[in-house]
Amino acid sequence: MEMETADLKQLSDFDNVLVVDKTGKTIFYDLADLHILKKLGEKPEEFLGKNITSFYKNLTEENSTLMRAIKTGEALINVEQQMISKTGSSYVSKSSTYPIKQGDEIVGAIEFSKHYFTKENIQFLDEYAGHKMYRKNNTIYTIDDIVTVNPQMMAVKEKIKKVARTDSTVLIYGHTGTGKEVVAQSIHNLSDRFGKPFISFNCGAIPASLLESTLFGTTKGSFTGAEDMPGLFEQAEGGTLFLDEINSLDINLQVKLLKAIEEKTIRRIGGKKNIQLDIRVLSATNEDPDLLVEEKRLRQDLFFRLGVVQINLPKLSVRPDDIEVLLKYYINFYNNIMNIYVEGMTEEALQCFKRYSWPGNIRELKNAVENAFNQVNTSEITIDDIPDRIRNFSGKANVIEKVPKVQSLRDAVEDYEKSIIMNEWIQTNGKIAETARRLGLSKQSLKYKLEKYNIK
């Protein structure tokens, strides 16, 4: 066999080698980066023996460089193509392709190529979702990762853009899984501090005895085994410190935190000098801040200092219009990072997702999609692929039945009002501040109505 001659010096520009037979089936490959197979949605052992056009949405017998070389018998030098894989991802290929002859018969073709990936399509190369330019500041999210068509969430995104321009403290309130960390990172990456560190810390993640040293640092000799160690405040110098689950902080430590934020100075444990700070503090809680203050679990003065601006994140159950767009987003996400290609989900499965109450919010939805990818056997997610709790959810939980008969209009109105209040009371597990906020009532008015209707 012989390969059609050409300017072979150009082959030094390429990393990959692919050989196909005269029908276009792959018979040999040597790829510098095997991740490209994941991008194509193929396993190494399954890559051989398939027609080269089967891997791409935009590749045909007519525009495939390998197929053209086979049909024409001519070499194609330094051809650039935008390749769109069956999984929906894309990259740019630069290739030189040559027919392979046995005597006068063309028996195949060989292609030397190099692949180039844009920022938008580099997800599969590592464990993060993208935004490589930001990773040096410890973040992985920007405002583009807040996926929504919901008016309430669109308003949140606009608020993020506005508060990012200042250095004011921001308190983010949202239930578990609503995306508080995404919001905090979005604020940092839209601000002038984006080039400096984003330091995130969950206040409920370590014992209370270690919190102070973790936040403020230690001085060598201040206690047995202590070394000179900067705390999180110092590590965030010039950037942003994000304190999640702020409600977990011991009440005594809240006093020191308030002082540090107000004076923009800290002193390490055992230290003798104050350290000046240039940081922005963001915080978050999964409990109603008003309720925390009312129950004296969050100091009122600290609440005012932390919450110069407050961002409230709605639960997924009150933004049903986002279910479908989030599903499309996460299906595309897992298509890019898992060795599986899914086009979408059946209408029956989609209705289950729309009907479900989502107590774990967006995090739960993301995990449910990942779970489905581990079960799916076809190009669509079916009702058999989704978790039992979603498939079997009736949608009848915590619903108060309407009274079938009333004696007067006044009775009907009061029965209806009672059912609404009771439903919200159950949903919030009896939290007065949260229930009042949902109903648009003052806490005093709600307490009156709870007594009136004997709701306990």
Image (cartoon, grey):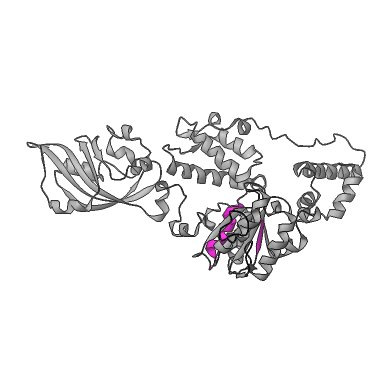
Q: Quadrant of the C terminus?
A: top right
Q: Position of residue 351 (x, y in %)?
A: 60, 36
Q: Nearer the viewer, residue 233 or 179?
A: 233
What residue sits 60% from the left and 54% below the top?
Answer: 201
- What is the span of residues highlighted in magenta in the rendered image? 166-192
Q: Position of residue 185 (x, y in %)?
A: 55, 58
Asked if residue 335 lies in the magenta stretch, the reply is no
What residue sits 42% from the left and 48% below the top?
Answer: 126
23 in relation to 96, above or below: above
- Image position of 377 (left or right of 209): left
What residue sits 14% from the left and 53% below the top?
Answer: 9
Q: Position of residue 230 (x, y in %)?
A: 56, 61
Q: Nearer the viewer, residue 350 or 250?
A: 250
Where is residue 102, by image quadrant? top left
- Image position of 155 (left or right of 332): right
| Outermost residue to the left | 103
- Image position of 106 (left or right of 40): left
Judge whether residue 307 can be spotted in this image: no
What residue sits 44% from the left and 39% below the top?
Answer: 338
Q: Position of residue 359 (x, y in %)?
A: 66, 41
Asked if residue 167 lies in the magenta stretch, the reply is yes
Q: Quadrant of the N terminus?
A: top left
- Tag count: 0
Judge whether residue 281 can be spotted in this image: yes
